[in-house]
Amino acid sequence: MGLHFGHHLGLSDALRGLPAAPLVARYGELVSLQQAVGYRHVGEVFLQEGRTFRVLDGLFIPGQGRAWRRVDTAVLRRLEHVGQATALAGRLAEINGGDPTALRRILLYQLLGLLREGEARAGDAVALGVDAAEAAALAHAAQRQPAATVQQRAAADGLEDAWLEKRLCLAGRLAGELPPGARQDPGLARRLKEIAAASRTADRETAAAGVHEERGDLTAAAAHYLRALRLVRDQARALHGLVRTHTSADGSVRAEPTPDAVELSWDDDSGATAWRVHRLTGAAETSGAVAEVAGSVAAPRAEDRRAPLGSEVRYAVVPLRDGVPDGPVRVSPALLVAPEVTGLRLSDGRERVAGSWQRPDGAAYVSVRHTGPDGRCVSLPPQEDGFALRGLGPGEHRFRISCHYRAGDRDIASPGIEAARTVHRWPGAVGTFTAAPGAAEGSVRFAWSGAEDAEVRLVAFPGQAPPSGTEMFLPAAPLPPELPWAPAATAPQSPVRTRELLPSHGTVADVTAVAVRGDRALTGPSVRITVPHPVTALRAERTADGHTRVTFDWPADASGVTVVRTQDGQRHEQHVVRSRFLREGLYLPVASSAARLEAGPALPTTTGVVIPPPVASYALPPDIAIAYRVVPGQRRPLRRKPATVEVTLSLPTEEEGLDLPEFVLVARPAPAGAGHRPRDPADGTTVLRLSGTQLRRSGRVLCHIAPDACRPPYTLRGFLLGGRAAAVRLQELSPTTLVMR
């Protein structure tokens, strides 16, 4: 296959100076790609077809026949399209294109590390994919080297990146952590010499800058510090020197703390292609920690999410041109990294102020200083997410809220933010609130105490009334309108204030007394008012069996109705349920004397106050009856004896003083016989008229009908006339007995 790397090495030279570090850029990225596909080492990318590899005298894989083919970029590009490790093969091709020796070095470094973790036997090497011809020699070489610790391997892995990024201070620290015997690696030894040489040059530049700085030549000093920073990116002395000797005005870098980070911004007027941002912690003028916040940002802004809480920091922004520091550094003013609370809200109430906020992550606690209207300042106990102060007088109350952070054994407080809230005068609270039936029928009398300096409104809240003492801000939380009930008689003067109103029937309301002063209201106690519907259309009618039939309109929502009958000085009460009333009606036994009926709904058994509705009443008149009958006269050959009418009055003894109606008997011709009765007193001839006085005088009157009063045949009918005719019952006989022939 021709000459290739390691063709003339021989076994002894191949085992001399084995790699103690990979010395490849972005080695950590390569390891991540390798681990993503589950490979123990990068050589497994060549084992996808079950083949081995050789690594001591160059990196080879089996070729045609017994030949071995050197692994070059073409082989790696082909492997990019085979199997699952395409990204890994592509990265290896990229590395090999820059340095043909790098791939063998990486693989040897990983194989030696794996073998040193075990017993380093030839069989272990074969299990890792090494050709059997090289397995024993590689295992023997691994046995001669001490196993590296995790820290030592990490130092070896990151050394090349530190060198390429010019972090020579970091590279020097990593060099001191390398495993024993690492300098036997020729490539690593050369790299360490280069690091040391560049560090010495940077130190000379820093020393020269110090001389100029002592002489007061800040421009020359800044130039030397800048050259040192170009050589050693992480040299804290050079960066501190640039900060001390910078000539731009303070504040050219603006730093704004937020709850999660420090936001940085600066003006873009230097023509730089990028900027590098450093954070200086501690005594930034002379020494202190330096951390790189952003290696290269294209826009004139950055964000520091790792700023140490409770520490004072400064930020230095170094302009870059093609990745090289160029031009004067920009420096921010000193900043205390102590984020303030966010979302601060203050609310006032009756003799109180409450505050709430969101505490930043990392804050140990929050302190609050309160300054009252009298200028007296008081510190509140440590808070977390809010506070509530009570018993405050009216006026403006100021608060300064600061976050506290732990910095070592020190307590660092943020500058704090200040806010104010005014405590207003609130109405006095309603003390007692009662309700009772008023003096007027169907009215309710409210009475309350307290709230002397406020207007008291009686309202009904929709739904459930708020608890007593609830604070309301008007008109943000509007009150319901006052009760629309008409006023009743004025309540008498008393130590407590009163109001008498007439609620409508069927009302069920929770009435709340609210004290109002200006745009602030304070709810008081509540009381439930229930006003049932009344009984209406009460009527009564006597029946023939000594009862009276009672009718009325059933009140809505009533479970029962109570009917009271008062007669002859006695009171009788009857409770009626709706179902029976609708099914059977209501019949009450009554005497013939006058009676009084009263009906009202059964009052509900509920909490609160029940206002009885007006009672329906009906006066049942006494049972006064007037009866009449006709006794026909006896017939004689030439003449007929006149017919006799007997009129009888039935009157309860206690009702003797009543005015009685007039009795009139009317006759109407009936040529066709019965069936032509008089329809009213004017429908015929009056044949008899008796006054109420005549009837009361004797109680029974006999009168004759003149023979010429009406020519037979005719029909008689009696009528009652006068104002009390409707209160007197007229008893009539069968119409057939009233036909005179």
Image (tube, rainbow, N blue to C red):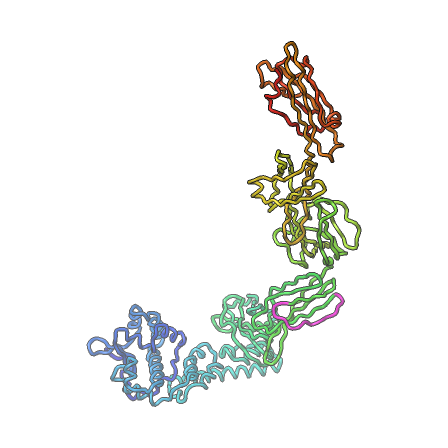
Question: Residue pushed farthest front?
Answer: 637
Residue 94: % across, % down: 35, 72
Q: Main secondary structure of the magenta part?
A: loop
**In front: 491, or 348?**
491
* Bounds of the magenta segment: 373-386
- Position of the N terminus by quadrant: bottom left
Which residue is pictured at 67% across the width and 16% down the height?
642
Question: Residue pushed farthest bottom?
Answer: 144
Residue 293: % across, % down: 52, 73
Q: Is residue 9 magenta?
A: no
**In front: 240, or 261?**
261
**Above or below, 670 relative to 127:** above
Where residue 432 sits, quadrant-wise, is bottom right
Residue 247: % across, % down: 60, 73
Q: Is residue 377 magenta?
A: yes
Question: Residue pushed farthest left?
Answer: 65
Q: Is residue 274 left or right of residue 249?
A: left
- Position of the C terminus by quadrant: top right
**In front: 452, or 389?**
452
Residue 475: % across, % down: 67, 52
Which residue is pictured at 58% across the width and 43% down the height?
578
User: How many numbered marks does the figure carry?
Assistant: 0
**Above or below, 536 relative to 315:** above
